[in-house]
Each structure stands twice: as C-alpha cells, then as structure tokens.
Amino acid sequence: MTDDQGLLRIYSDRTYTFTTMVRHQGTVVAFALDDRRRIVYTVLDLSSFDEKRGELDAAYWSENPVELPFPNEVVTVGYGVVGATAMPVVKRGGRAEAEDGEELAEEERDVFLSSTARLTADGVPFQVVSDGTHVVVLRQAVGAAHPDAVFPLSGGGCSGDGTRADVVKDAAGVKVPLVADTLLCDRFLLVGGALKPVGEVRFRRSRHRSEPESAKDSLGAVDMDGKAFFEATRELAFVRNLTGGRFAAVLTPTAVQGQQRWQLFAFNQVTGRIDSFNVEQGADGLFNTEGSRFWTSPDERYRASVFEREQGTCPFTGLALVPVTSETRHAETALRFNGSSAYVDLGAAPGLRFAGRAYAVEAWIRPDAAGGPVVARWSGAGQGGFRLRVTGTGQVVLDHGTGSLTATQTVTAGQYAHVAVSFDGTVATVYVNGSFSGSAVLAYGQDGTAGLRIGAAQGGGFFAGVIDEVRIWTRSRAQHEVAEERVHRLIGNEPGLAAYYRLDEGAGTQVYDQTDSAAHGTVTGAAAWVTSQAPVGDHPGVRRDSFTLAGRDVVSGLSASLYYQQEEAVSGYDDAAKPAKRQARVLLACATRPSGNTAADAHIAGVDFGVGVDGRLADVPDVVTLSEIGRPVEESAAQVTAQEQKVGQLQQEIKAVQAAIAPLAVEKAQLGAEIAQISAGGAEDPTKWAVWVRTVKNAGWLVYSTRFPYGTVVDYRGITKNRWQFRPVPGAEGRYGNPRVTLVGLDAGSTVPATQWYLQGDLTTSFELQEVTTDLWFTGWTTTNSSQQRSTFRVEKVGMAPDSQLQVRQDRYAVVVPLLAGLEQDLAVKQAELVLANEVLAALTGALLGAADLVLPVPSIAVDANGLSCAGALLKFARSSATPFLVDSAAGRVALYFRGRAGSCSPRIWTRVRCAGCSRSRRRG
C-alpha cells in the first residue's frame, strides 16, 4: 500500500483485473478480483476519527485487502429439497483430494480449492449488491472445461477429478459439471469491519435444512462434530450461458413495504440476447422462484369475493379454487393468420424432430370459423409427422400418419382458447383449456420430410385466426402441468421445453425462440401483428424477457443501477417546492459495437426501464433500436411547433378518455355493491341455496326421474346427485310458518315439473313436504294422505342457486369491467406519452433558446400496456469497450463512469427529472 498525497489509497500487493464497490449500511466496501481468481475486499471505516490519520477518507481504508471467505457447499436455487453438495477437500500443496472419511487439519487443507472460490470464472466482472442486511456477491461460474471445475458423484458429493468412474454422466456419456457458465450467489454479514459468512440452522445429523436423518435428528447451528453450518453458495441455474461476466443485478422496490424483487440482466452467449429475469425475493432475502400464489373462484362472477392464500373450495360454486393470474397484460402481441398464405416457417428444426418419442405441443388460439393447422410438421396423410389443427366446426384434432384423435370439447370461433396435445410414445392426449378432452393409442412412425410450421402445414392447409404462446416439448405433459402453466409465461429453461415462441416481437418478420435451442422462425405471407388478449399473466416467481440491441454486439460486462426520478413538489410548513422521489427506474449500460465488426469503435449503450408497483420492469420490444446521441444539433422552430401540436392532441385525447371512464366507474361501483348485497343476503337464506335433498330415514338422495313426476329417492352407491332449489312463490300464502315453495331442479336434464309445496319444519334442519293442490304428503316418489308414510327430508348446501336479479347485474358487470379496464389502460398509456412529449418539448425549446446547460432528450423506446416507459440511446461521445460503472445519488442522478480508449476513466452524469417515459442526459466534463 502507498499513500499518494493523502488522497488515494493504492494497493499494489497483487495484480487486479476487476474492481467494484457497494454502500452497505452507510459503509463503503470495495472489492477486487486478482489474476489468481481471488476476490478480496477492503472497508472504508469512518465510524471514528483518528487525529493521527487526519480527515481524508483515504486514511480510513483497511490496511490490506482481505480474501473473501466462500463456503464449501453449493445448492441450486429452486432445488433446496435436494440439499447442498459438498465441495471436495483438497490437500495443500497439490490437487490431491482427501479420501472419504479422511480428516484434515485446517492447515493441511487448500482453502481456495476446497471451497466454492475455485468456481469463480477467470478475469471477468462480478457484481456486489447490498440488500440492507447482507452484502450479496454474484459471480460467473467457470466452464465445464476449466481445470477447477467439479463434477457430481453418483454416491453424493463432487470431485475435481473428471476421470473417476463414479462421475455422473448424461445420456450421451458426457460428464456433467456441478456448475458451468451459470450465476453464483453468496451472502455475507459486515461485522466489525469484516465480512463473515452467514450462519444457518440445519438438522445436525443429516446436515440438511429440511430433511432429518431420523426421528432423533435435531436442529442446530453446528453438526455432530461441532462444525458450524453456513449458507451454501447458491447457483442460479436459470441464468445460463454466461461469458465475460456479462450480467448485472439490482433490487427493485414494490408497493408492499419492505418487499423487493431481484432484477437480473444476463447476456446469453448461445442465443445472443440479453435475458432479463425478475425474481421474487423470498422471506429469507434470497430467491423464491416458485413465487407467492393466491387462489380464487373458478367462476368469474365470484372472483371479487374469493381470495385465499391456500388451495380450497369455492364457497359459492363448491368447485376447487384456481390460481390468481396476474392482472397486468403480459401476453403482449400475437400473430393473426389469414387462412390462405400466412405462417411462421421454423425450417427443418432438427432439434424438434420427435421420431416417435414423447412430445407435447400447446398454444393459445382465437380461431376464425375456418380454423386450420395450429402447429404442424406434415406432408400429408401416411407420410409421417404430426398436425395439431382446428376444424371448421371447432373440433381440436391431432393427426399422426394415418390416425387421428379428436377432442370431446370444441373451441368457439372468435374466442381465445388454450389447446394442447401430449404424446408419451404410445398414447396421445388432448387438453382444451386445461381440461382432459380425450386420449387414444396413436402410432407416430417417422417425422417425414416436411418442415415445421406455425399456422400452416406444408402438406396443405392454413390457419385462420390468432395464435399466441406456442410451446413445444420433448416430453409428455400431465393435465395438471398444462392447466397450471397455461395461464402464465414460462422462463425458457423448464425441463423438456425444446422451443418457446411468445410471439411478442410486435413487428418485423423474425420470431424468436426463448429457449437455448434458438430455433428462430420467419413470418411468411400476410400475417399481421395484433395485440393479444390471451389470459396469460406473469409467472409468480420468475419473469423472464429477452431482447437484442439492433445492429449492436455486447462486448463488455453489464452494469445496472436503481434510481428514483426527482420532481419539485410543494411540501412542508412553508409550502415551498422541494425535490421529491417519484417513480423508480433502472438504468442498464454496457459497451457495444456494430454487429460483426470487431475493428469498429465500441460505444456505451444505455437502456432505461420504468419500474411498476409490483417491482417488475417495463416491457421492451424483442429488438431494441437505439438512437445515437452525440453532439447537440440546433433544432428549428418547426420542430417545436410540431411537438406542441402533439402535446395538444394528447391532452384532448386524455380528456375524451377520462370523460368515457367517469360514468363507467360509477356504474361499476354501484353494480359491485348490489352484487355484494344480494350475495351476502342469499348466503343465509336457504331458499336461495342450491342443495342436495335426502331422506332422514334411509339417507336416500332425491334425483330426477322420468317415471315419477316429483323425482324419486334412491340410495345405491355411485348415484349422481342432483341439485334442487326450494324457490319461494311470490304473493302466495304459506303454511306452518313457512312460505309456499316450488321445488325446482337446477341441473341439465331435469324433467321435474314446477310443483308447489307447503313446507312443514325448517329447511336448515328437517322438514316434510305437502303438495298444495291436493294436501297430500310427499313420500319420496309419490304422494300420500297417510302421515305414517310421508318422508322427512333434510338438505345439504352445495352452492348458490341461480338468481335472476343477481345474474342481470353480474352479466352487466362482466361487460363493464373489461371495458373500464381497457379505457384505464389507454389513459395510463396516453398520460405516459404526454409526459414524454412534454419532456421532449422542453428539451427542444431549451435548445432553440440557447440554454446554457443543454439538455439532450434520450429517445423513448416504448410505452408498454401497463403505462411503463422505456428509453435508451447509444452514447456516441462514450467510446469504450470496458465494463461501465453506474453510481446513483440522493439527488436522482446516475453517474456513468467508463474507461476511455487511452485507459483514462471518464465520468458522464445522466440526470432524470420530471420524466416517466423519457430520460434526459446532461453532458458534463
């Protein structure tokens, strides 16, 4: 260490290849990676003043960097039940591993090779994040061919010796690395100026967090040998194909106090795209990939009244609850096919040839009356392959060679439906809207020579209608998988998912496969991009998007920073305008150069995302086109005038939408109150229940009958019970203290006439029925005047009976709600566009008037369906091929540092003010 004029702290004890820093609980911690792949840190301790050191910060850094202590176990996120895998214990002075049961003293072990530190990739950037409690270190894992890679063993544990006979291998006989080119995560606590690993409580004998070895196993902080438990290194296997440390991580806020989400960006070397992962932060602060799920009624009419944290039964319908889907629109766009020439050509797609093996295909569709092939590799009958199609009458059909399977359910023209087929190698099964719809033995044969297509079959036929969310699997799919996952988007790395087409490109002729297969397609013919209304929400745990920068290659690590827009707002006792935090945003930056041109200069590219109340980022197009920002250009008065006209037009459109929203909002509130009032009143009124009726004496059930006019009582097993309602007769005189009722059959196929009865007793306990016109008593199949032969009945509530008044309101409510939601969505988008337009106008006006501090507008990329904006630009004044560094400030500014071509470090400050859809960039020296 040397002290350069008291301003710098320089450590020259080793060669460093990458540095970063983080603020944690008010303390700055700097990190560095050296040329031996050791990550070290140093702490700026300003907790006390030392007269000998003086007042300059440089004197308060650690005397020497300290190597970060990594754990000796690895666990894959989402597979915690499997338990952690222990790293091999390596003897000091070589690479020899300790034998099973061989105990080594601490000084005999190679700490680096015996911990997950050996899994750190060579010379690439890493990231450090503070979550307020922990310091989180994220790093790229070594590749499978690296000398320090380790491989799982069939008997448990792992080894760096890939020649061992017990190394786990895949179906092709290739050894499987424990981790390879994925993302690793470790957490540390800052205690007394030092970073300590996080302790953990486990079962002492099994050393597992949730699985005891036996009933005698107990929880503790140490194992049976007294060795402390520490958190294992987490592998985020869904962040894959990393290279060059090209990833970034931030924590985004949500509307729930104290609840955040992890936002990860990663460049996927295989697909050539930037993957964006938004993951729920678990209660332990780590990654909850399953997400928090909530449950509601399967009937849309009752969803506003049913919201549960666990699965159960709907109190209104008696049916099983279904998962709540995201209210935000994430189906984005879809393709509309004309039924005569349009399709998506996936080519030969060799990775999607099934050759008679198990497979599954699914999609959301909105067919026109003609239907047609949805997904097919089909030359014609008897020539191999498969074809999933919809007939002109709405039948869903799967064709194999010369055999076919037709679903028992049909789909309706003009309405969205989910169709899926699954084949296990022998039996084919069809699912419609997540429900089983038929199965049969269906021989497959060969694939034939046809290419794979969406919306058409090479052997003839075109689909007419809309197709969205196409998923192709190389395994069969169970009914519960199809039903649960059809309503949310996938990540892209699910087991067996071979190709995944979200069809969210929205423009152009390229369709991107969201898996590592990269089986991209080409839109052919007169297909049109349309807004999708498919009921597809976000995955509750992980949301994955991917995009490319048009015409640019990513050539550096990624850097991301969360910041809040600042706006002047009146507050305080003096009613003075003060800076106030507004919308949270995330800025992503990296070095890029023209695609395929390695000799061209690299420039920093920046993409700026709005953050929603749920912590998720704004949607961006699959291909992001960035405008260049260089030296300012004088703007003309004509441009200002045009922009003023645009602002005025948006203001008028907003007023019109607001005028349409107001009466609908009032009507929605009134209908909701009336529906709740009617539903609440009926819940305690047995005459408004749907019930099963049974006799008290022999426990037989009253069912419909064609032989007996009032129905008949049967008591044999397996009977299909029928639903009834004891409906009061308006204005009619009752008896026995009860109203006169009509016994009405509620199920389809009821042949029971609407007979009126006097009810003696209590519907909620037990009662007898007396026919009004004859005064005879009901026996359970006929009537009698004998009080000895009459039957006593009781009811079992199974739900609510149809209510005409309630139904009218619910039907109107079902019309008003989506209409109002659409208008509110349009309003949010137009308001965001207005803010953007005003920002651009301000920037143009400043340029025209010769403002001293010139503001350069960063162009908008898109405003998504939820009103969140995204902006971005290519900074032509920022020439660099090195990883940039972003630092936010309390004033709402983000400082972008980048290394110049001569090795110098140049800062530029991006200031975001009064902006929801546009970023401003002030260039400062």
Image: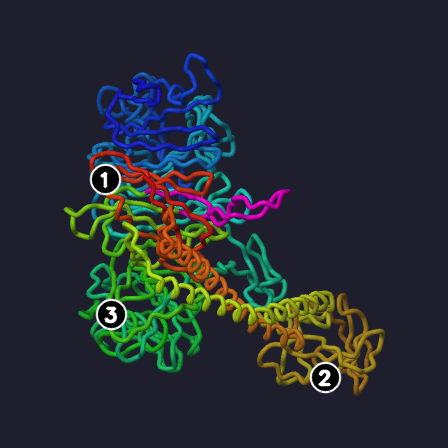
Disc 1 on helix, strand or loop? Answer: loop
| Residue drawn at (31%, 31%) of the image | 19
Q: Which residue is mark 1?
A: 144
Percent across and percent down for residue 531 are 40, 68
Percent across and percent down for residue 670 are 66, 69
As measured in the structure, the alpha-carbon distance from the residue carrying label 3 to the one carrying label 1 is 35 Å
Q: Which residue is mark 3?
A: 377
Give the vertical position of 812 relative to 260 (above or below): below
Q: Nearer the viewer, mark 2 or mark 3?
A: 3
Q: Residue furthest right?
A: 736
Disc 3 on helix, strand or loop? Answer: strand
Say if mark 3 contacts mark 1, CB within 8 Å: no
Residue 444, which numbered label? Answer: none
For the residue marked with disc 1, what is the amino acid? Ala
Q: Is residue 619 visible?
A: no
Which region shows up in magenta?
559-586
Q: Quadrant of the C terminus?
A: top left
Percent across and percent down for residue 418 are 41, 68
